[in-house]
Image: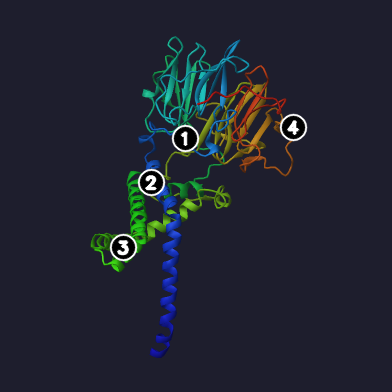
Amino acid sequence: MAFSNRKRTPKRKEKARTWRRLHKWVGLVLTFFVFMFALSGIFLNHRTAITRWDLPRRWMPRQYVYDNWNNGAVVGTLRMGPDSVMLYGSNGVWMADTFCRGLSPCSDGLRPGADNRNIRAVTATPDGQLYAISAHTLYRFDGTARRWHDAGHALPRGEALTDVQAVGDTLFVVTRSQIYAAAPPYDRFTTLPLPAPDDYDPRVSLFKTIWVTHSGDLFGLPGRLLIDLVGIVVVVLCLTGLVVTLFEIPIRLRKRRGDPALPLRRAWTFSFLWHNRLGSLFIVLLLLIVVTGMFLRPPLLIPIARTQVKPVPGSTLRSDNPWHDRLRRLRYDAEGHRWLLAASSGIYAFPTFGTQPRKLDNTPPVSVMGLNVWQQTGPGQWVVGSFSGIYGWDMTDGSVTDYDTGLPLGDSMPRHGRGRPTFSNPVSGFSADFAQGPVIFDYGYGARIASDPEAAFAPMPDV
């Protein structure tokens, strides 16, 4: 046995050298990217703390630059009068005429930062008051001063807002977990009762589970702080790895010339020791971050996007609220005398708050990323759009048609409301308020007139 071990020793040493070389040179090539992943991850773990900071889009790759109202610059519009339209989206709020001419910004009063100027919905009350929501703020518009004011003091802080609607004289604000209502003067909100739906499943999305595991939010603030520590460790590993790799050559050259190399040698030794110690100590958490991160983007995201799993015991995913982190949009169907509720699990209907929502069948396909367009265009006629395309929905007979072609949805297409994201028609917005007719806003291409896709829409100002 001793002879056999001696024969294998050189092979083991050679394998160890090979792995060290791979670790060294592959790591050197990837250092910048890994460093940026870790640093940006730490910032994103505390998103609200950095929302005031902006980077010019001209510094970003071309796909992030606004062109022809793309990148969600417009998600919707509101007709303000016979000759004026309000546009809103990721680029804030704008006013224009019905041909989208004479554009003027209308974002005064919105909190600084692109994240805070990302307006997701605007609604008007019967007395003419305007309310808008960003991800975390409810705004009220002062028409005299043409300025927005924070109106969310009566809402619980920290909840992500998803929709705002005025029905009759009542203002409804939807968060990801609750629906709130307020009567004039809209300074006091009450939580509306919303029982579990008829298809309630306590399981949660595997994608969501992986997402909050990757960020540490699975266990709230302590979990996020632990992942922050791992991010700092990754930054240190990147820096010490650079020292270990790049200092070797100058140390050797100095030794050959007979020059002192002690300071460099000390820095190399210190970096080498801590690089190995931190890597060994945090290896499990480092692997967890890498593996979970791989599933947050295609292609590995695609097979898990619809998978449901039991919530992790003791985690933030467990809740007594059956709608926890599931609510998206709210509409009132006047013809059907019922409420329509879009959630991550589908579209539901119920006559009054407090009655059990019933899931609707034969709904248009909706991307896993949620609805971007949900607008009534006539009695029983709705337009539904997401990153899975845009569709016409006739609620009188349940038929669904491709909005662009008018053709019925094929039997091969999903009719349960769940559609895969499409690269050819990722719809981010829609408007029926312009004189040119309905306008579809594609996330990548930008604005196109539905009746004449080749015709140019109004140019977007430089921002």
- Label 4 or label 1, whichever comes before in sequence order: 1
What whole-number distance in Å separates the C-alpha atoms at marks 3 and 2? 22 Å
- Label 4 or label 2, whichever comes before in sequence order: 2
Q: Residue, x 39% and y 57% (percent of image)?
A: 286
367 to 163, vertically: above or below = below
Seen from the viewer's position, the closer of residues 366 and 271 is 271
The image's mark for residue 405 is 4
- Label 4 or label 3, whichever comes before in sequence order: 3
Q: Residue, x 38% and y 57% (percent of image)?
A: 285
What whole-number distance in Å separates the C-alpha atoms at marks 2 and 1? 28 Å
| Amino acid identity at mark 1 | Arg
Instruction: Provide the residue designation for mark 1.
Output: 176
| Amino acid identity at mark 2 | Leu
Instruction: Provide the residue designation for mark 3.
Output: 272
Seen from the viewer's position, the closer of residues 28 and 436 is 28
| Marks 3 & 2, CB-CB < 8 Å contact | no
